[in-house]
Amino acid sequence: MCEANAYIIEESKEDQGLIMEAVDRVIPEDDGIRLVSIFGDQKFIKGYIHSLSLVDHKIFIKLS
């Protein structure tokens, strides 16, 4: 499986909250990003991608 989990990243790297599992698509939009899971669930986040950990299958999102 190649999907990732998405996390909100706060001030310190210890403050990471899981917001969606099994993310298949990350779609940039004008005022944020849309996450779509392999099950078709969608979430819109007003933020931007802070970093990716491809080996660990993690997407870190910083709120704007």
Image (tube, helix red, strand yellow):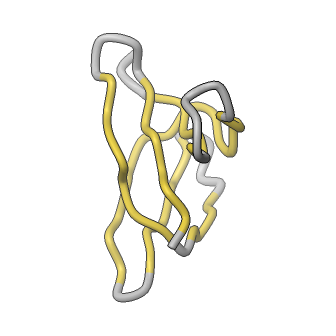
Quadrant in the rendering for residue 18: top right
Compared with 55, 34 (above or below) is below
Compared with 16, 19 (above or below) is below
Instruction: Give me the residue at 43% from left, 37% from top.
Output: 59
Compared with 26, 18 (above or below) is above
Instruction: Give me the residue at 54% from left, 75% from top.
Output: 46
Percent x, y for residue 35? 50, 57
Outermost residue, bottom direction? Answer: 30
Residue 18 relative to residue 2: left or right = right
* Tally of marks: 0
Percent x, y for residue 45? 57, 68
Instruction: Give me the residue at 36% from left, 49% from top.
Output: 50
In-front residue for pair 11/31 = 11
In-front residue for pair 30/48 = 48
Percent x, y for residue 55? 30, 11
Instruction: Give me the residue at 32% from left, 40% from top.
Output: 51
Compared with 53, 61 (above or below) is below
Q: Quadrant of the N terminus?
A: top left
In-front residue for pair 43/48 = 48
Percent x, y for residue 31? 43, 86
Outermost residue, front direction? Answer: 11
In-front residue for pair 31/41 = 31
